Image (tube, rainbow, N blue to C red):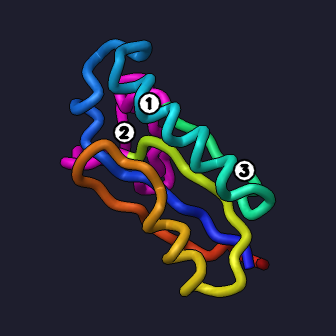
Amino acid sequence: MKYGLFIYEDESLYGLDEAGPKIQEIVGKHMAFSQELGEACTGGAGLMSTATATTVRKSGGKKTVHDGPFAEAREQLGGFYLIEAADIDEAIEIAKKVPILQDGAIEIRPLVGE
């Protein structure tokens, strides 16, 4: 079964410099983790900061465009993995290994039609 692992962290921990030492540290950990997953990793990517986000919202039949993320939150979606796992228990074990800098969460969701 295929699952999405969505990584939520406080992006302010990384600072404003996209090439800073904390970013380099976590990217290195993610590269190693991806290699450890091997063929179980079917895709994924890191995301730019929420300052680069644009949201299209539909309300009352009208669509509007807004700068920034959908909602303010303490933790922001920073990246994701698409994985193949036998079941939710295996997906949980994989999610427990996803590198995060400090506190955060890994949301696990089965993909539709998988």
For the residue pair 112 and 78, the one nearer the viewer reads as 78
For the residue pair 111 and 63, the one nearer the viewer reads as 111
Q: Which amino acid does label 1 sit on?
A: Ala
Image position of 50 with respect to 39: above or below: above
Relative placement, left or right, of 20 versus 24 is: left
Task: Name the residue at 45% across, 46% down.
Answer: 57
Separation of marks 3 and 2 at Cα, in angstroms: 23 Å
Q: Which amino acid does label 2 sit on?
A: Pro
Query: To which quarter of the image does residue 3 belong?
Result: bottom right
Task: Name the residue at 51% across, 75% down.
Answer: 93
Task: Name the residue at 29% across, 16% down.
Answer: 16
Image position of 97 with respect to 57: above or below: below
Image position of 91 with respect to 98: above or below: below
Label 1 sits on residue: 53
- Of callouts 1 and 2, the N-terminal one: 1
Q: Which mark is residue 69?
A: 2
The span picked out in magenta is 48-76
- Of callouts 3 and 2, the N-terminal one: 3
The answer to whether mark 1 and mark 2 are in CB contact below 8 A is yes
The answer to whether mark 1 and mark 3 are in CB contact below 8 A is no
Image position of 87 with respect to 12: above or below: below
- Image x and y of residue 97, in percent: 47, 61
Separation of marks 1 and 2 at Cα, in angstroms: 6 Å
Residue 56 appears in the rendering: no
Q: Which amino acid does label 3 sit on?
A: Gly
Q: In which quarter of the image is the C terminus?
A: bottom right
Q: Residue 43 carries which label?
A: 3
Separation of marks 1 and 3 at Cα, in angstroms: 21 Å
Relative placement, left or right, of 42 versus 106 is: right
Q: Which residue lies furthest to the left in this view?
A: 74
Task: Name the residue at 59% across, 43% down.
Answer: 32
